Image (cartoon, rainbow, N blue to C red):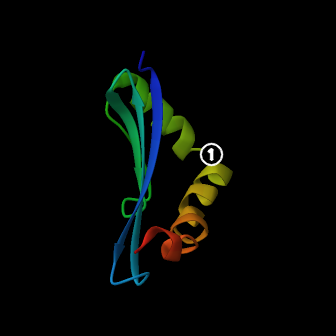
Amino acid sequence: VFQYMLKGECYYVNGTERVRFVVRSFYNRLQFVMYDSDVGHYVGFTPFGEKVARAWNSDPDFMEQRRAEVDTYCRHNYEVSTP
């Protein structure tokens, strides 16, 4: 039974010069909220997702950590994830 899934992805353009970090949350195969480092905040796609996005976006510590993951997660693991 598919219920909840969190998917984090790093997109690299020109090595680590341009890095994009995307986190998507799904419930029952429906994406309800997404964070994109290019946008800089969460976006909700369902009524519940909009509530979650508002709550997460209003937490400065949580958002600071999410924004830093471009460096701590993506750039840090660049050599591991590229051939």
- What amino acid type should be assigned to the residue bearing mark 1? Asp
Pointer 1 residue? 59
Point out the residue furthest to the front here.
83
Which residue is at a point 63% across and 52% down the rendered structure image? 60
The quadrant of the picture occupied by the C terminus is bottom left
Residue 57, x across and y down, in percent: 52, 45
Q: Residue furthest top?
A: 1
The residue lying at 57 percent from left, 56 percent from top is 66
Q: Quadrant of residue 40?
A: bottom left
In the rendered image of this protein, does residue 24 appear above or below residue 48?
below
Image height of 74 relative to 24, above or below: below
How packed mark 1 is, by other alpha carbons closer than 10 Å (few <14, some 14-19, many 20 or more), is: few
Q: Which residue: 61% across, 68% down?
A: 72
Above or below, 41 against 2 in this view is below
- x and y percentages locating residue 29 in the rendered image: 33, 26
What residue is at 39 percent from the left and 82 percent from the top? 15
Residue in the foreground of this view, choosing between 20 and 56: 20
Q: Is residue 11 left or right of residue 3?
A: left
Q: Position of residue 20 (x, y in %)?
A: 39, 66
**Residue 16: x %, y % from top left:** 44, 81
